[in-house]
Every structure is written in C-alpha cells, then in structure tokens.
Amino acid sequence: MDWSYYELITSVYDTYFEYKDENFSDYEALARTTYDFELSMNDGEAEKATIYICLARIALTHLKISVRTKERTREVLTNLNINNIRQQLSTEEVEDLLERRDYILRQFENNAISLNHDSRARWYYHEMTKEVKVYFDKIFSVTPSEEVAHKVLTRFERDCRNTISENITIKVTLAEILINNGINVQEEISNILDELKKFNIEDVGQKLTEEEKVDLSRRIRGLLIR
C-alpha cells in the first residue's frame, strides 16, 4: 500500500474540498474526486475499500445520492475481501475501516435517503437555490448594482444550460434576490419573468421531487403576480 490508511482518507477528503472550493456542485466535486482515485482503487483491496468508504461518506452529506452510486457502493462494500485487507492494514485500521463500512451500509438501508434518478443533474434544487444566494452575498458589496445580475448569470451560465430545472431555479432565485433587495435592473428581471411565463413545471419530469415542484411553482407565482 503506497499510502498509509489515514493518509489516503485525508487525501480523498482534501481532493473533494478542493473541487468544492473551485465552485463545483456537490455532485460534480464527488464525481471528479472519484475519477482522480480510480487508479488507486486498483492498487489493492484496502485501497479500494478505503476510497469507496470515503466517497460514500461524502455522498451521505449530500441532499441526494445517485442511484448508481448507491448500488455500486453497496455492492463493493458488501463483497470486500476482508482477509486481503487484514494483510495490508493493522488490526486497529481494519477495525476502523469495518466500522466505517458498516455505518454506510446501515445508512444505505435508510428509506429516508433521497435518490437522484437523473444522471444529468449537477445541482439539486435546494442546493442550487442556496448556491445562488451565497454567490450573490459574496459579490454584492463589491459589484455595482447594475452589473450584479449579469455577473450572477455569467457565474452560472454553464449550469443554466445543463437542465431546465437548474436553469429555472437559478433564474427564480436571482429574480427574488433582485426584487427583494430593490435592485433596479428591469431588463434582466423582465427577461426572467418572460421566461417564467412560458415555463411548464411538468417539463422538469423527475428532475425535481413533487415537493420541489410545488415549492418552485409557488415561487414562480409569487414573482409573476408582483
């Protein structure tokens, strides 16, 4: 094992948070971290187990977990070759690994976990709403009011192109922020409202839960009747 057990754990987490610091969504940061450690997973059973456990533990902090990620992780962790792992790690490390593994498998049996069935989704509804608000707060005090809407839309341009639910969530959140803060950028607000008038909530399909659809519809109505 080229890494020590705890060094590998730290490296996985550090890599994930580096991607988060670069403004990647939870989903994207996890996907990129997984890719970065794919080769290391093949170094041995201990490496594979440690990396999968770290990635799964991170996934459990997200609002939703990919169906494919959950199924693949459960398969790998259920079928670990513990004898091989005992040859690579100390007794204390094996006990720690198994404790972490068992925790994840128990959590995966929890029916309350929200699953993501859309492989294209990069941001989830409440996560996207929060991210737009956080970014606005970050730039508001250092950006002229007439430029703030354009800057927010530029920051999330790629996400607006990704899925219709991400696009509309970004636009609704931005419009709410602009109006609530009395920022007079009528052209940007009018463009967003025109887009919302043409939007059909059923177009998002399974990208949003029924509760999320209800909430988004409520927010849209609130903007259109102002």
Image (cartoon, grey):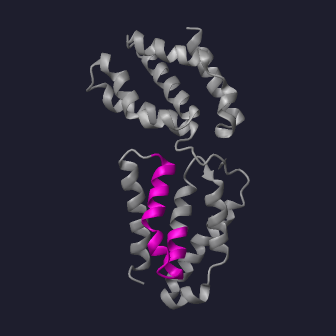
Residue 66 x/y as whole percent: 62, 53
Q: Is residue 160 left or right of residue 184?
A: right
Residue 220's x, y, as percent? 60, 19
Image quarter hosting the N terminus:
bottom left
The answer to whether residue 217 of the structure is visible from this angle is yes
Figure quadrant of residue 71? bottom right
> Which residue is at the front of the view, 118 or 182?
118
Residue placed most toward the observer, 80 or 153: 153
- Residue in front for this viewpoint, 88 or 29: 29
Relative horizontal placement of residue 181, taking residue 124 as reference (left or right): left
Residue 193, position in %: x, y?
A: 52, 14
Q: Main secondary structure of the magenta part?
A: helix
Q: Which residue is drawn at 65% across and 33% down?
A: 204
Query: For residue 49: magenta?
Result: yes
Within the image, what quadrant is residue 94 found in? bottom right
Q: Does the magenta stretch include residue 13?
A: no
Q: Magenta region: which residues?
A: 25-52
| Left or right, residue 20 beside residue 198 | left
Where is residue 130 shown, x and y percent of the image? 48, 35
Residue located at (44% from left, 60% from top): 33
Residue 145 position (above or below residue 78): above
Q: Is residue 214 visible to the viewer in this orientation of the structure?
A: no
> Across the whole image, how many numbered discs are drawn on residues?
0
Quadrant location of the C terminus in the rendered image: top right
Tell me: residue 68, above or below residue 131: below
Would you place residue 71 above or below residue 64 in this image?
Answer: below
Corner quadrant of residue 137? top left
| Vertical position of residue 99 compared to residue 137: above or below | below
